[in-house]
Image (cartoon, rainbow, N blue to C red):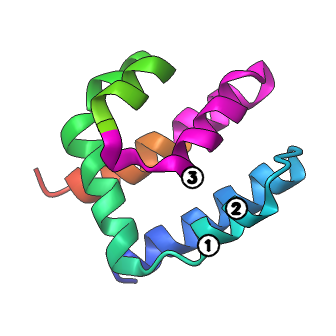
Amino acid sequence: MRMGQFLKEKATNMSQWLATAGKLSQGNLSQIESLSEVQLVGFAQLLHDECKEAIVQRDFDGLLNAGGEQIGSNVREVVVFVRERDELHDKFWRYMSLFSDTVGKDE
């Protein structure tokens, strides 16, 4: 399976998980699912290059600050949604690690 295809599958899974967790803005979730494989690889690369420490520390503010404007408003909304719900934290950070580690596995 290609990296982009794998990330697409995982992004779709994450989107569906967030929908069942009660994320109100379905439009933003469908935008996550509509990202191309190339866009998802770019997002994962951003997480790997700029947000690695925030992911390790499970630091929501650090994630938003490290990613800067490149994170995008849809992802910001997801981060804010998850941050407010303790029961979602562990799985969210596992997804962030998965995305970051996928592009960094050749290091």
**3D distance between C-alphas at marks 1 and 3:** 11 Å
Residue 104 lies within the magenta run: no
Considering only vertical position in the picture, is 2 above or below 16? below
- Residue type beneath disc 1: Glu
Considering only vertical position in the picture, is 25 above or below 81? below
- Residue type beneath disc 2: Leu
Task: Please give the name of the residue rendered at 33% of the width and 43% of the height, measured from the top-left corner.
Answer: 69
Helix, strand or loop status at disc 2: helix
Do labels 1 and 2 touch, CB within 8 Å?
yes
Q: Quadrant of residue 12?
A: bottom right
Residue 75 lies within the magenta run: yes
Q: Which residues are magenta?
A: 69-94
> Residue 29: which disc?
2
Please report whichever mark, 1 or 3, sits nearer to the chain's N-terminal start. Answer: 1
> Residue 74: which disc?
3
Helix, strand or loop status at disc 3: helix
Do labels 1 and 3 touch, CB within 8 Å?
no
Residue 106 x, y percent position in the rendering: 14, 57
- Nearer the observer: mark 1 or 3; the answer is 3
Please report whichever mark, 2 or 3, sits nearer to the chain's N-terminal start. Answer: 2
Residue 8 x, y percent position in the rendering: 51, 74
80 displayed left or right of 97: right
Residue indicated by mark 1: 33
Q: Which residue is at the front of the view, 51 or 9?
A: 51
Task: Please give the name of the residue rendered at 57% of the width and 52% of the height, measured from the top-left corner.
Answer: 74
How packed mark 2 is, by other alpha carbons closer than 10 Å (few <14, some 14-19, many 20 or more), is: many
Task: Please give the name of the residue rendered at 66% of the width and 24% of the height, measured from the top-left corner.
Answer: 83
Question: The N terminus lies in which quarter of the figure?
Answer: bottom left
